[in-house]
Amino acid sequence: MSADEHAERFTLLRPLLFTIVYEILGSVTESDDVLQNSYLRWADVDLATVRDTRSYLARLVTRQALNAVRASARRREDYIGSWLPEPLLLEENDASADVLLAESVSMAMLVLLETLTPDERAVFVLREVFGFGYADIAAAVGKSVVTVRQVAHRAREHVRARRRRFEPADAATTARITEGFLTAASTGDLEGLMSLLAPDVTWTADSGGRTTAARRPVAGAERVAAVVMTLFRQERMADLRIRRVNCNHAPAIVLSGERLEGVFLIEISEGRITHFYAIRNPDKLLAVAVPRQISR
């Protein structure tokens, strides 16, 4: 078989493979590294022995992703402040009709998946999001089918008990609330801002100790409004540019000046903002330049 056929098969499935790895790792840059490493291994495979390319490559990238998780375990343990996944920049309408896919890459779901063990996370993602059979999952994680069934049940119950209701706001509501938020924040309209916030709204910031940010989540409309007003104060905004984007299937705001200041995802439910995810660690902002394609 030619190198071109290896490349063609891998490229065709790359959005799917990237999505699997990103949901296991929560890192765009590490996912790129895993795919690169996996492709080098794939290039040496005799294609005549591959009966199902999708399953074979899913197993391959999952094994490499789990290796990456184990290698980064110490970095996670020593992390300063809240840890959030890297923001995933998407095309404005990327897979917008696929609610399951949208939820699976949402910041809330990825944060929830962080509470699982690496094996539980991989099994949950492969089974619940991508629908792989237990035999394929067992081969991917190096466990028996019986064990994988038990792990899948445990992970599913864990997620079900902690999952928040996922009902993505329609495009018109999202645009209205995002525009209203930007107007209120940039003009110092505290009353207008408070009208957009749910009473129990939460602000979670990830700086890794690299820049100024709250190291613990801030909860409650008044406290979160104070954080927003400080961040968007007018004298500071004079030197910054605002760009609205789609990250993890949520409206997001990119603030940049001489360098990228941060990406701020807005979670909306029942017409109010319920959560802000503020990613400010410079290392986690490197991938917010080119939109990614995801698929299942």
Image (cartoon, helix red, strand yellow):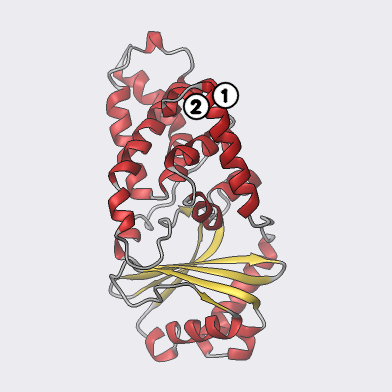
Quarter that holds the N terminus: top left
For marks 2 and 1, give the CA distance. Answer: 6 Å
Image-quadrant location for residue 271: bottom right
Q: Secondary structure at mark 2?
A: helix
Which residue: 57% across, 34% down? 152
Q: Is residue 54 visible?
A: no
Q: Amino acid at mark 1?
A: Gly
Q: Residues within 10 Å of mark 2 (few under 14, many from 20)?
A: many
- Disc 1 designates what residue? 133
Q: Amino acid at mark 2?
A: Ile
Q: Residues within 10 Å of mark 1 (few under 14, many from 20)?
A: few
Q: Give the left or right position of residue 53, taking residue 69 as reference.
A: right
Which residue: 55% across, 52% down? 109
The mark found on residue 154 in the picture is none
Image-quadrant location for residue 133: top right
- Disc 2 designates what residue? 137
